[in-house]
Amino acid sequence: SMLSAPGLPNNARDPRYRPAKPGKAEETEVGTGGVRAGPAKGVHMDAMHRRLGAYATLSASGAAPSAAARQGLANKLRELLPLLQGLALSGAVETSQAVADLQPAPEHVAVQWPALFEPQILACGAEATVALSRHGRGAHLKHGSSVEAVPFALHGVIGHGAIVAAHWDTQGLLVATAAGAVLECAGAGPAGGRWACVALPGASLPLDGTSKVALSRATSGALRAAVLFAGEASVTVFVRAQSAAKWLIHGEVRAPPATASAAFAGEDLLLGAADGSISKLHMVDGSMSEMTPANSGHDGHAWSSACQRPSGE
């Protein structure tokens, strides 16, 4: 044969290389017995034809799922990804971490806020929490004490834009503004109703004025910021190794839809929704877990900020 090596079958008579017989309703392999007597016997059954016909009718009608249904399905699949990763690596689904992260619904506390004060941003310290307005007014709430908030003012923030984020650590209070400036208010807290702040040197954060921002500082002094730009379903992480260095993009990860606030909690990022629910984004592996369910029973209220105490509460 000119088509096959010596000792091998002649491929010129191989049924796979010959066209189907004319006049048949469907293509079959010639020489193998066809649909009724060949290897495909029993595959083309009436039930299968009915199912395929129904699918073809549905596809032709254009009755596709709604955008909300597709988004809901995508969110559920995204929540399964960390579990599937653990299943692929260890052969078992690890749910202990997700159960441990889930906290009970927060308790409602009636705080006596200062007059004409609109709290928008929270920053948790070791012994107290501060609530800030967009324009530099604040209220100091000591942990385990009465619900009365002691008013104070941040001095030095005027002229840098509205406050969009705050972080309180052992070195002081860090504040980010809508213009991208980062200010440091040194000390353990306000004194005499004032907390002096100075702008840190270096480049500004690339913000658009409507971004949700989280801010933190490492023990080495390096700054880290997580930015949720308006209209994007992702979190962009920026780092600045030195006080006068530029902000560099460290990475990007997807965020839940309708995220209303962001705050760092150690190596994790807390993403809050307007209904009070909080998700924890683990920055090490990018997995997501639910931390606090929606805070029901407070219709007409929106939750614009959240923070975690060093004790984990």
Image: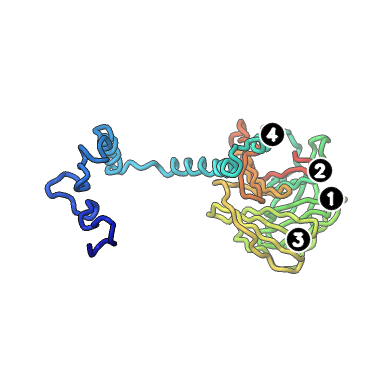
Q: Quadrant of the N terminus?
A: bottom left
**Which amino acid type corresponds to the residue marked 4 in the rendered image?**
Pro
Q: Say if mark 2 contacts mark 1, CB within 8 Å.
A: yes
Callout 1: 10 Å neighbours few (<14), some, many (20+)?
Answer: many
At x 82% / y 40%, what residue is drawn?
142
Q: Where does label 3 land, which residue? A: 222
Kindly indicate whether the residue at mark 3 contacts the one at mark 2 (C-beta within 8 angstroms).
Answer: no
Q: Nearer the viewer, mark 4 or mark 1?
A: 4
In the picture of the structure, the residue carrying the numbered disc 4 is: 106
Identify which residue, 183 or 147, lies in the foreground. 183
Disc number at residue 189?
1
For marks 2 and 3 on the same chain, the one whose residue lies earlier in the sequence: 2
Q: Using the numbered discs, state the Cα–Cα distance from disc 2 to disc 1 in whole angstroms.
A: 9 Å
For this orientation, the residue located farthest to the left is: 23
Q: Callout 3 environment at 10 Å: few (<14), some (14 to 19), or many (20+)?
A: some
Say which amino acid is labelled 2. Answer: Ala
